[in-house]
Amino acid sequence: MKIAYVYDAVYPFTIGGVEKRIAVLSERLAARGHEVHVFGLKSWEGDPCFSRNGVQYHGVGHPKLLYKSGRRSIGEAIYFGLKVLIPLSRQRFDIIDCQNFPYFSCFSAFFVSRIRKTPLVITWHEVWDNYWDYYLGLFGIFGRAIERLTARLSCNLVAVSDMTGNDLQPLTTCLPVTILPNGIDIQHIDSIQPSGSGSDILFVGRLIREKNPELLINAISIIFREFPGIRCIIVGDGPEKERLTGLIEKHKLGNNVTTVGFMRNHDDVIALMKASKVFASPSFREGFGMAALEAMACGLPVVTINAPKNAVKELVTGKTGIICNPSPESFAEAVLLCMERKDSMGEECKTRSLLYNWEKIVAEVEGYYSGITGKT
């Protein structure tokens, strides 16, 4: 099959769960003999088109700021949607897989799919619906309208989690929605040695308000009263960093909480996971939870919160972590319980993570594409 993936950000020039998913699927499908092309904004030096690990990459426009005032840039989304239209239409593909966000590129992919008579798959990583009101205020109505229109562009709809699939179903008349989750490279994770810098609690994620790092710091301030030696490492960067630093200073946790910023070598993140006791995922909006899944593969129980848009809840059972109320007191209690039960929960975490091995998921994706195209 000749496969096209469409998303504005390209791994490893931009690091994120969606970028990583496309990179892994592309390279592993190429290794299975398929011709794979990735279309994104040109965020690398040199020629706009290049080949890596059997995958053809197409830079369709100059990079723009992904975030503006802590939010995904609407201007960047429109820009990419316009820029990808012509390059994508120049070739005939067996299938086009466009990521639902940031929406406008889905309309370009839809147009190309119609003129080229190519099946269009839209992979959904999140459904926001009423969350748009929180995100954009009075302008949330426009976000909901675009999202609902996107859901009707194709009947080949994929969701990366059950939560997203369930949220998507009311927006479309095309059922069922196919669940094809993200995955992890179990063998590679197993090969990485623990870091020499361990911690009791580890947080990994972009420092944005949706990731809710403030809840973690407030919880640590409670734990500190009983365990003044508690140690936490925060991996990530983002617009909430300055406010988070101020909160750490306010609670006088400078000796307990270490912020290390963004770590470009992801193996270093895995090494930190293997040297920690509990993974904290306080996000109130998470489309899948790749970092939490990787932590489980390292034997870390996960503490997350009971929030309607938090898909990490699907990964966590009573044997692999705790889903708690979104309050500092509940989060602190859950962290302490998981620290106590780390040894007994660790093996269960590793066992559950095996359900998300990339080899299994790539085969499912390949089978899904074959079922649509009739090609192998």
Image (tube, rainbow, N blue to C red):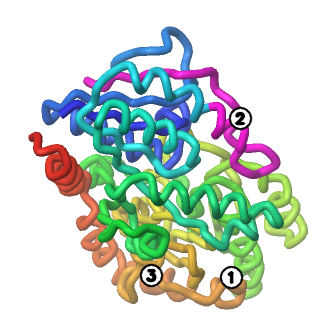
Q: Secondary structure at mark 1?
A: loop
Residue closest to the eye, 272 or 168: 168
Residue 11 seen in the figure? yes
Residue 2 position in % (x across, y down): 23, 30
Residue closest to the eye, 23 or 373: 373
Q: Is residue 252 above or below residue 325?
A: above
Which of discs 1 and 2 lies nearer the camera? The answer is 2
Q: Secondary structure at mark 2?
A: loop
Amino acid on which disc 3 is placed: Gly
Check the picture and name the quadrant holding the C terminus.
Answer: top left
| Residue identifier under label 3 | 321
Number of marks in the rendered image: 3
Amino acid on which disc 2 is placed: Leu
Amino acid on which disc 1 is placed: Phe
Residue 59 position in % (x across, y down): 50, 21
Q: Which mark is residue 227?
A: 1
Over which residues does the magenta segment extend?
52-79
Label 1, label 2: how many angstroms apart (C-alpha)? 42 Å
Which of discs 3 and 2 lies nearer the camera? The answer is 2
The answer to if 66 sits in the magenta stretch is yes
Q: Which mark is residue 65?
A: 2
On the image, which quarter does residue 184 sit in? bottom left
Residue at x 47% of width, y 59% of height: 151
